Image: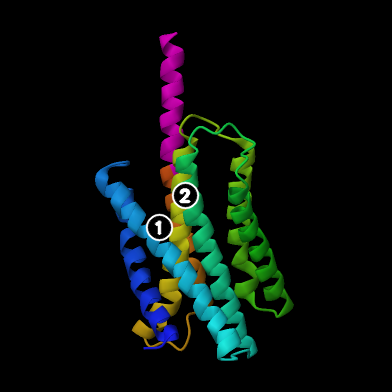
């Protein structure tokens, strides 16, 4: 087995692991043993997926010489999805490490990862508009939005004591969008004998998972509001 085939095997295996473990932390006790265990498995799987995605994309471009416009565009998009997956999973971890930061976050690496996501999303979108590819033009706006909110959080700090929970949920579920998108776009056509995934299928995971992000983060905001009200009533 050559390194390209090995990378595919590792990529597919990590993809299925991530797809399965994405959902478990949402429905087990937060901060409990199974939440942490499955969360780490998901995060490590996403890091592996990111590395193998970049390797496969670069291999197709520089080793296979596969630079036909459609294939080249797909390889570039794989790199963007890899950056999106890594940046969101990484952010989900880092907000746990800096739960009490008050703004003006000084860890350069955290700013650089978010900036990398922002720049790659902008570049991917410009490329899409240049070649009139609707998917490549519009899907990266998700990355622009996510990167902007990450940088705003590092700059602004916590709005309330458990803001880090909201940011952690947002980071991990945003990473989940990458996982599910890759599955439905690459896996669904093979399962249902489609020549290619329709455009709406690319955006379906975003449409489904964004409301989940809103739902779980809203729960945290309401908990914070109730605690503030309880404190005021006790005074």
Closest to the observer, 156 or 229: 156
Q: Is residue 186 above or below residue 178?
A: below
Q: Position of residue 156 (x, y in %)?
A: 63, 36
Quadrant where the N terminus is found in the figure: bottom left
Callouts 2 and 1 close, C-beta under 8 Å: yes
How crowded pointer 2 is (Cα within 10 Å; few <14, some 14-19, many 20+) is rated as: many
Q: Does the magenta portion include 230?
A: yes
Closest to the observer, 20 or 233: 20
Quadrant where the C terminus is found in the figure: top left
Q: Main secondary structure of the magenta part?
A: helix
Q: Which residues are magenta?
A: 217-235
Q: Is residue 221 above or below residue 77?
A: above
| Quarter of the view holding residue 15 | bottom left
Q: Position of residue 16 (x, y in %)?
A: 33, 70
- Would residue 16 be found to the left or right of residue 224 on screen? left
Determine the residue positioned at 60% across, 86% down: 62
Q: Earlier in the sequence, mark 2 or mark 1?
A: 1
| Quarter of the view holding residue 83 | bottom right
Determine the residue positioned at 58% across, 31% down: 102
Give SS at disc 1.
Answer: helix
The residue that disc 1 covers is 43
């Amino acid at each position: 087995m050559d390194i390209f085939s090995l990378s595919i095997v590792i990529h597919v295996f990590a993809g299925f692991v991530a797809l399965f473990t994405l959902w478990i932390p949402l429905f087990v006790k937060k901060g409990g043993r199974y939440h942490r265990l499955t969360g780490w498995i998901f995060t490590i799987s996403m890091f592996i997926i990111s590395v193998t995605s970049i390797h496969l994309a670069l291999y197709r471009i520089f080793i296979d010489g596969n630079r036909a416009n459609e294939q080249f565009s797909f390889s570039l998009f794989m790199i963007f999805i890899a950056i999106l997956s890594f940046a969101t999973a990484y952010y989900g971890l880092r907000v746990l490490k800096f739960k009490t930061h008050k703004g003006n976050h000084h860890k350069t690496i955290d700013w650089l990862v978010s900036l990398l996501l922002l720049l790659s999303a902008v570049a991917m979108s410009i490329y899409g508009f240049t070649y009139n590819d609707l998917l490549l033009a519009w899907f990266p706006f998700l990355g622009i939005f996510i990167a902007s909110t990450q940088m705003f959080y590092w700059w602004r700090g916590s709005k309330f004591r458990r803001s880090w929970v909201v940011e952690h949920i947002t980071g991990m579920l945003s990473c989940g969008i990458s996982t599910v998108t890759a599955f439905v776009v690459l896996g669904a056509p093979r399962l249902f004998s489609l020549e290619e995934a329709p455009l709406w299928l690319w955006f379906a995971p975003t449409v489904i998972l964004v409301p989940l992000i809103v739902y779980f983060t809203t729960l945290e905001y309401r908990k914070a509001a109730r605690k503030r009200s309880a404190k005021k009533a006790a005074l």
